[in-house]
Image (cartoon, helix red, strand yellow):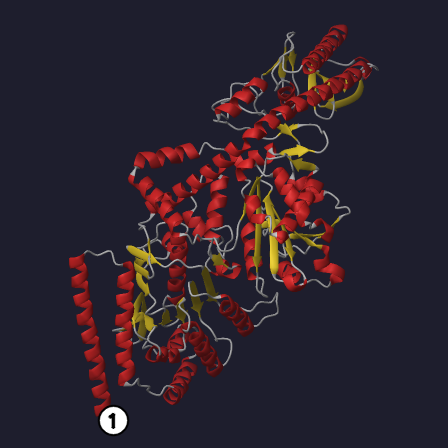
């Protein structure tokens, strides 16, 4: 007998099995081996957002000024701060709803709470949980106010302080942590604040999801702030690490350049690594070795790349596997996955039918759920199935009888709302008295198509639903037993997930090398890049961007970059920072040669825009950013400063720049400082570890009109820029009247004569500078040289000649100055 409907159709046989013959018949299977059809009540983000939040959780929705802020977000973060003497000690716990890993953190933060904001920014949270005491009576704590200011598009939920209980948190972890990850207990048992955050987070998830995590099923990890380099959210935005500032949908960001991943887990890992680069050189070199091997073995590279593309989202599967509904609900199919672990697969094969799969249409899916579990597994399930089959046979028989009784072409159809009902199509026939017999009820009509039911058919539908509930209940019991068995081997899936995402990321980084000419970086005490290129600009530009050299060492750790507007200073500074980040995530870099010193923090101070949200002027924003750098900088940081003091008068700007430079010069941090204040170039004569560099420009004169124009070479050279009044040249390119430009030139020349007096360094200072440079070069050679004896001897002889030449040049300069006097 043929049963059809608007959504699907099937053939019913008297043996009690249903063969689907809808649109999916004969279609290619989505998996290549046995398919697991999982049943459980999963967490639906959309449904959870619409639930009313009752006591004890008070929801405070912030104004969503940026709807795209939480697009695709699935992480819930709990944050708690110590009180009294422990203020500044932060505990954090986060859990990705798509990946069941509980990540704990505890650290001491400064008054700016930079580490907290950065870690939350990296998580891309869907929701942030904090104690209700943090926002009590509208007078939020400083941490609460900072979080709500920095994440206006993220939901905030206040939870009673009593749920932030470190003892309960430790009990949760002891109960839920998979045995293979239980060493984390040694790390966190004295970390009271992260345990308290974990307790509140897990209790909240239990409340909103109406489910709990299975015992010994969660991966729990502790991540301190010292394991990775810190990049604050402002620097991540300035450098366009994961999002393009002009167009958020554009792929012109560092993540867009490097992301060739095939799995969602690989993409998440790559994003996380870009925002938190590694600081362990051994781990970085292992990644570089792997990428090098992939590039050298083409067969291995393409074989792995092809294989990795067949993996589904294992993290999503894990999140389903480890959750147990607190109360039985109508079970629904959530995921299909091909499992290659023999032990788990064998257990699944003994319970789940081989041909169980996902099909479109509610009737098809209902049929799949009815017969997903093999027969002879549960006697009550088999009885319920036979009852269901008999009822469906009775329905089909009833419809046939009705068709024979009236001589009309009736057929059985199905819909989710009505269940089984009768459909009939009249083609030219006329109904007696123009209407259907009275026993046909709930009649619908569309053109010549009639849909209706009868009282007997409705009773059969009720019996059918009752049988289905029995089948679903029994199937639920069987599947829960299967899942409890799988939970014993859950660590295999965690390891698989971790291995697949890591391999996917490394393949992605190797793939980036095949598109552009990248080189393997080294790690020494020196930042040295030969013919380095901007990785994002290289992908955007139709032609190869101009390459530049970079060199920063302990001997000259402060580089001042000058040059006209639009000469490429900002691009060069960002290029160095991006190459540093690429090297520290284990990627090759766009250069002919590259050596880096591992940076524990990367700071940037770029741009001169007002900030209307925090009511900050250009100058105040500059001061806040530079204050943050000064309070958090260390000897192994990399600092990028592009313009400082431009928001105030020239005298005050130069004074601030000078004092900030002198503070940074007292440290061993690597600093690149771009400025238009040429007065700062005099620092080179005062401090031996300062080096002046400039972006070179060329002047050309038109043969016809005699007008002078500027050609930007975008090349970096030693020394201070000799260009003067280049801002006025930029103004000439606009529509400003020529008489205004000429008057401005005249005034600027007079001011320059008064302000820029010639300053000379005494001969002794120059000699000390030459000796200092020799000492630092010898020190770096002793630390990092890999030369053999003969090559090292040759290098040292050359170094000696260079030292003598520089010493002689310093003496000649001193003699010339004496003669002039």
Front residue of 264 and 245: 264
Identify whether 568 is placed above or below 534. Answer: below
Residue 87 image-quadrant placement:
bottom right
Residue 15 visible? The answer is: yes
Query: Compared with residue 173, is residue 371 higher up or lower down, i.e. above or below?
Result: above
* Residue situated in front as seen by the camera: 248 or 264: 264
Q: Is residue 160 visible?
A: no
User: Is 114 situated left or right of 762 in this image?
Assistant: right
Residue 299, image x, y percentages:
31, 34
> The C terminus lies in which quarter of the figure?
bottom left
Closest to the observer: 215 or 814?
Answer: 215
> In the image, 358: left or right of 212?
left
Q: Dot 1: within a 10 Å radius of its alpha carbon, few (fewer than 14), some, or many (20 or more) residues?
A: few
Residue lying at 31% horizontally and 64% vertically, measured from the top left? 551
Which residue has dot 1 on it? 821
Q: Position of residue 301 (x, y in %)?
A: 35, 37
Query: Residue 611 lies in what quarter of the image?
Result: bottom right
Q: Is residue 34 left or right of residue 292?
A: right
| Residue at point 21%, 76% (across, down) | 806
Q: Quadrant of residue 404?
A: top right
The spot of residue 204 in percent (x, y) is: 69, 45
- Decide if residue 689 is on the left or right side of residue 94: left
Q: Indicate the quadrant containing the N terminus: top left, top right, bottom left or bottom right.
A: top right
Count of all numbered marks drawn on residues in the image: 1
Residue 715 screen position, x and y as percent? 30, 65
Measuring 49% from the left and 67% from the top, which residue is drawn there? 629
Q: Residue furthest right?
A: 438
Secondary-structure class at tag 1: loop
């Amino acid at each position: 007998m043929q049963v059809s409907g608007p959504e699907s159709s099937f053939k019913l046989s008297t043996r009690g099995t249903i063969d689907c013959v809808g649109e999916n018949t004969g279609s290619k299977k989505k998996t290549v081996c046995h398919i697991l059809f999982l049943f459980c009540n999963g967490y639906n983000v959309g449904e959870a957002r619409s639930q009313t939040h009752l006591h004890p959780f008070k929801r405070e929705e912030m104004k969503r000024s940026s709807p795209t802020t939480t697009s695709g977000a699935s992480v819930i973060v709990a944050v708690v701060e110590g009180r009294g003497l422990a203020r500044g000690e932060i505990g954090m716990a986060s859990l990705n709803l798509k990946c069941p890993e509980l990540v704990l953190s505890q650290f001491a933060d400064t008054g700016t709470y930079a580490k907290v904001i950065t870690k939350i920014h990296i998580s891309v949270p869907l929701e942030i949980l904090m104690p209700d005491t943090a926002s009590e009576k509208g007078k939020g704590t400083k941490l609460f106010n900072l979080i709500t200011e920095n994440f206006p598009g993220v939901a905030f939920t206040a939870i009673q302080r009593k749920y932030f209980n470190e003892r309960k948190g430790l009990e949760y972890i002891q109960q839920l942590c998979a045995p293979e990850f239980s060493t984390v207990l040694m790390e966190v048992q004295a970390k009271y604040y992260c345990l308290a955050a974990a307790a509140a987070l897990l209790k909240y998830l239990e409340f909103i999801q109406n489910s709990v995590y299975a015992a010994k099923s969660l991966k729990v990890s502790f991540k301190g702030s010292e394991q990775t380099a810190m990049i604050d959210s402002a620097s991540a935005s300035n450098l366009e690490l994961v999002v393009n500032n002009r167009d958020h949908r554009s792929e012109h960001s560092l993540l867009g350049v490097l992301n060739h991943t095939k799995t969602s887990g690989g993409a998440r890992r790559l994003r996380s690594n870009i925002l938190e680069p590694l600081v362990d050189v051994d781990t970085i070199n292992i990644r570089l070795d792997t990428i090098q091997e992939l590039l050298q073995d083409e067969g291995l590279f393409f074989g792995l790349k092809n294989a990795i593309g067949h993996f589904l989202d294992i993290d999503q599967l894990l999140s389903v596997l480890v959750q147990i509904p607190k109360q039985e609900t109508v079970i629904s199919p959530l995921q299909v996955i091909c499992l290659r672990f023999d032990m788990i697969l064998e257990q699944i094969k003994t319970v789940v039918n081989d041909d169980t799969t996902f099909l479109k249409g509610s009737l098809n899916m209902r049929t799949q759920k009815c017969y997903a579990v093999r027969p002879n597994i549960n006697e009550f399930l088999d009885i319920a199935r036979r009852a269901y089959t008999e009822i469906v046979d009775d329905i089909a028989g009833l419809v046939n009888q009705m068709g024979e009784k009236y001589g009309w072409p009736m057929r059985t159809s199905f819909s989710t709302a009505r269940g089984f009902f009768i459909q009939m199509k009249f083609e030219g026939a006329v109904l007696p008295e123009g209407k259907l017999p009275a026993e046909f009820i709930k009649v619908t009509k569309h053109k010549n198509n009639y849909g209706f039911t009868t009282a007997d058919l409705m009773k059969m539908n009720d019996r059918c639903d009752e049988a289905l509930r029995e089948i679903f209940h029994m199937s639920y019991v069987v599947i829960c037993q299967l899942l409890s068995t799988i939970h014993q081997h859950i660590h295999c899936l965690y390891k698989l997930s971790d291995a697949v995402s890591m391999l996917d990321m490394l393949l992605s980084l190797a793939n980036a090398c095949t598109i552009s000419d990248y080189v393997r970086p080294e790690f020494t005490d020196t930042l040295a890049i030969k013919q380095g290129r901007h990785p994002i600009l290289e992908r955007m530009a139709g032609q190869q961007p101009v390459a530049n050299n970079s060199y920063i060492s302990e001997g000259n750790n402060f580089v001042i970059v000058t040059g006209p507007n639009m000469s490429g200073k900002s691009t060069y500074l960002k290029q160095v920072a991006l190459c540093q980040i690429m090297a520290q995530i284990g990627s090759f870099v766009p250069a002919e040669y590259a050596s880096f010193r591992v940076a524990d923090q990367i700071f940037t101070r770029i741009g001169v825009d007002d900030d209307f949200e925090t009511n900050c002027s250009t100058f105040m924003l500059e001061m806040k950013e530079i204050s943050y750098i000064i309070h958090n900088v260390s000897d192994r940081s990399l600092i990028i400063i592009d313009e400082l003091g431009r928001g105030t008068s020239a005298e005050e700007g130069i004074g601030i720049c000078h004092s900030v430079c002198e503070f940074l010069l007292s440290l061993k941090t690597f600093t690149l400082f771009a400025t238009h204040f040429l007065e700062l170039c005099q620092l080179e004569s005062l401090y031996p570890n300062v080096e002046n560099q400039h972006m070179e420009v060329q002047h050309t004169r038109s043969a016809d009109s005699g007008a002078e124009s500027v050609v930007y070479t975008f090349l970096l050279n030693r020394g201070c820029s000799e260009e003067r009044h280049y801002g006025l040249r930029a103004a000439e390119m606009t529509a400003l009247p020529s008489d205004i430009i000429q008057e401005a030139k005249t005034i600027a020349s007079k001011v320059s004569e008064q302000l820029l007096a010639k300053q000379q360094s005494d001969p002794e200072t120059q000699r000390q500078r030459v000796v200092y440079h020799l000492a630092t070069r010898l020190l770096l050679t002793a630390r990092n040289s890999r030369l053999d004896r003969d090559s090292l001897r040759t290098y040292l002889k050359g170094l000696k000649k260079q030292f003598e030449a520089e010493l002689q040049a310093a003496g000649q300069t001193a003699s010339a100055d004496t003669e002039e006097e």
